[in-house]
């Protein structure tokens, strides 16, 4: 990146040099048109500086943007690694809109920092130093008359850094809040959520416009100062230069060059006003990424994981206790599920059925006791191994914004349409074609269709234990029976664990437990109903 900064400084120096050489050339051509040798030399210098400036600027853009793009790719991967540690508990920690705007704005702020801060700053320093030193060699007063206005311009940008940084941070926060609320409103557009969100969005919009207005005020104040200082420096250079020309210290042609070079130097000051905001945005972006990095996920994988054995897995809960908030949801629960068996958990709403399932998929760790797969405690196995071994249909049936086919291929990437069609029939989804667009979160499907796609996906996954949370909650009795048959036909002898407060899934069970008051109570299996399925 130092290469791009150096190239930018050289390009700015070339621009100032070009202005100076052009001034000298034009004046010489007017004052001494017969001095061909000197004019030819000046024309060559102007051409060389013109071409050089363009080439340097081009090289700077190429190097700078190549660096920014590479850095952006690296930061995006880093950001993904940071948030992917959180698994399914991610969205309980952060709103989707926040995550979305962070993923974009934070990466952008850090990626473009070099182009927005050190590059213009060092270009300005190079130009201001060159002008001041050159004029100092001619006359100290001339140096003061051109150097001081440049210094005042830079000083004004420096005094703006705190308000500019504060405004940039406010703007970032407001935009994040706005995108989070906007996304919530769009997601809830079918309900009255979007109407309720309107006043908040309007207020946020107004606040964003106020910060944008304040930023514009800072910008025009800077522009005004820069223009005043520009006028002062050019007038000062002309005034003192005229004296020096009269005294014979300076020729008229060199004075013209000097004045134009001074004017060109102020061009390099143009971007100084954007530095504080860009710097502040980068700092807050880096801090937010650090906060995420320092946050410990609800569950973490072990540093040296044990492998799960091949083949069918036995599942055990030994004295498992889970407390959520003030409540003890599970209280010393024991459960043994032999490979290939089907266990159905029933119990009143809020009894803790989903909580128990989350222990199995290691979305949650117990406060006491342990969960094992064929004797291997879950926290000692790699998280990815556990989540490959168990496939889950959660109650919310999370679908991705894509086609039905794409959603199901997440579980089995090799699934063909020929294999898919009979499966859709089994799950009463044959009125939808594989190309059917399900919308964000599956909003283009009914609740029951969403659940059926999610159940089918859990069954298609190459897991060894299938976990279904309320698989038939949204279904009419006929479709429920069809889906239960579909589950039975596609479980392929795998262990099946179902949480349901409806009676029909009991027909699949080898073991039934009622979860109540934090304890599992065994019930007789519904062997008569099983024949129906
Ligand atoms: N993160 C949490 N913090 C505090 N309490 C929680 C949390 N998650 C769930 N709970 C509470 O834990 C209890 C058990 O919830 P759970 O979802 O496991 O019940 P459930 O038996 O699956 O209910 P349902 O049949 O309605 O789905 C509920 O009272 C719920 O309010």
Image (spheres, grey):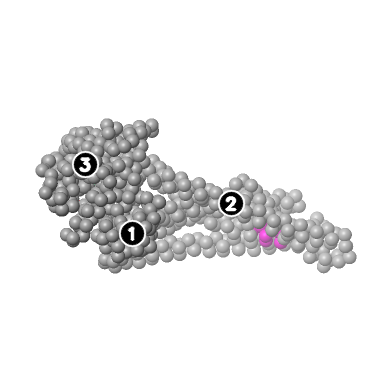
Residue 121 visible here? no
Q: Residues within 10 Å of mark 2 (few under 14, many from 20)?
A: some
Rendered residue at 34%/57% (across/down): 420
Q: Nearer the viewer, residue 79 or 380?
A: 380
- Is label 3 in contact with label 2 (beta carbons under 8 Å)? no
Mark 3 secondary-structure assignment: loop
**In front: 257, or 457?**
457
> Relative to 38, is 301 on the left or the right?
left
Q: Which residue is mark 1?
A: 421
Q: Is residue 39 left or right of residue 129?
A: right
Query: Residue 515, image x and y in percent?
Result: 14, 44
Contact? badges 1 and 2 (CB < 8 Å): no
Is residue 28 shown to the viewer in this render? yes
Who is closer to the viewer here, 192 or 476? 476
Residue mark closest to the camera, 1 vs 3: 1
The magenta span reads 260-266
Q: Which residue is mark 2?
A: 66
Mark 1 / mark 3, whichever is N-terminal: 3
Separation of disc 1 and disc 3 at Cα? 28 Å
The mark closer to the camera, 1 or 2, is 1
């Amino acid at each position: 990146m130092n290469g791009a900064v150096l190239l930018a400084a050289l390009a700015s120096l070339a621009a100032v040099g070009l202005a100076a050489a052009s001034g000298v050339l034009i004046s010489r051509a007017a004052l001494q048109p017969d001095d061909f040798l000197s004019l030819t030399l000046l024309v060559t210098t102007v051409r060389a500086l013109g071409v050089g400036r363009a080439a340097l600027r081009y090289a700077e853009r190429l190097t700078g943007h190549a660096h920014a793009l590479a850095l952006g790719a690296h930061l995006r991967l880093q950001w993904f690694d940071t948030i992917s540690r959180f698994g399914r508990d991610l969205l309980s920690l952060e709103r989707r809109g926040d995550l979305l705007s962070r993923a974009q704005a934070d990466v952008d702020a850090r990626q473009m920092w070099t182009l927005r801060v050190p590059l213009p700053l060092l270009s300005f320093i190079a130009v201001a130093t060159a002008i001041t030193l050159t004029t100092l060699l001619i006359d100290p007063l001339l140096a003061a008359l051109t150097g001081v206005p440049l210094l005042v311009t830079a000083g004004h940008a420096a005094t703006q850094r705190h308000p500019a940084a504060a405004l940039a941070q406010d703007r970032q926060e407001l935009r994040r809040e706005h995108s989070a609320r906007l996304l919530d409103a769009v997601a809830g557009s079918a309900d009255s959520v979007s109407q309720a969100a309107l006043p908040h969005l309007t207020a946020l919009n107004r606040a964003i416009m106020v910060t944008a207005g304040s930023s514009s005020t800072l910008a025009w104040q800077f522009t005004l100062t820069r223009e005043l200082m520009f006028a002062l420096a050019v007038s000062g250079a002309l005034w003192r230069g005229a004296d020096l020309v009269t005294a014979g210290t300076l020729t008229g042609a060199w004075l013209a060059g000097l004045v134009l070079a001074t004017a060109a130097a102020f061009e390099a000051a143009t971007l100084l006003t954007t530095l504080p905001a860009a710097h502040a945005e980068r700092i807050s972006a880096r801090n937010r990424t650090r906060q995420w990095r320092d946050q410990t996920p609800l569950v973490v994988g072990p540093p040296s994981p044990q492998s799960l054995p091949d083949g069918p897995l036995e599942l055990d809960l030994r004295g498992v206790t889970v407390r959520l908030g003030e409540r003890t949801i599970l209280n010393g629960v024991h459960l043994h599920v032999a490979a290939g068996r089907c266990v159905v958990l029933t119990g009143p709403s809020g009894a803790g059925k989903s909580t128990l399932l989350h222990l199995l998929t290691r979305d949650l760790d117990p406060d006491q006791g342990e969960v094992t797969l064929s004797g291997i405690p879950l926290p000692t196995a790699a998280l990815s191994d556990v989540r490959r071994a168990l496939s889950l249909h959660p109650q919310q049936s999370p679908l991705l914004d894509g086609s039905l086919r794409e959603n199901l291929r997440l579980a089995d990437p090799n699934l063909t349409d020929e294999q898919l069609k009979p499966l859709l029939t089994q799950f009463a989804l044959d009125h939808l074609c594989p190309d059917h667009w399900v919308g964000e979160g599956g909003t283009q499907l009914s609740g029951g269709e969403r659940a059926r796609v999610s159940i089918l996906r859990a069954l298609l996954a190459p897991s060894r234990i299938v976990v279904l949370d309320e698989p038939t909650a949204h279904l009419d009795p006929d479709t429920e029976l069809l889906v239960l048959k579909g589950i039975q036909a596609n479980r392929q002898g795998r262990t099946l664990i179902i949480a349901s407060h409806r009676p029909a899934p009991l027909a699949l069970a080898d073991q039934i437990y009622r979860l109540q008051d934090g304890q599992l109570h065994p019930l007789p299996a519904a062997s008569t109903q099983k024949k129906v399925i």
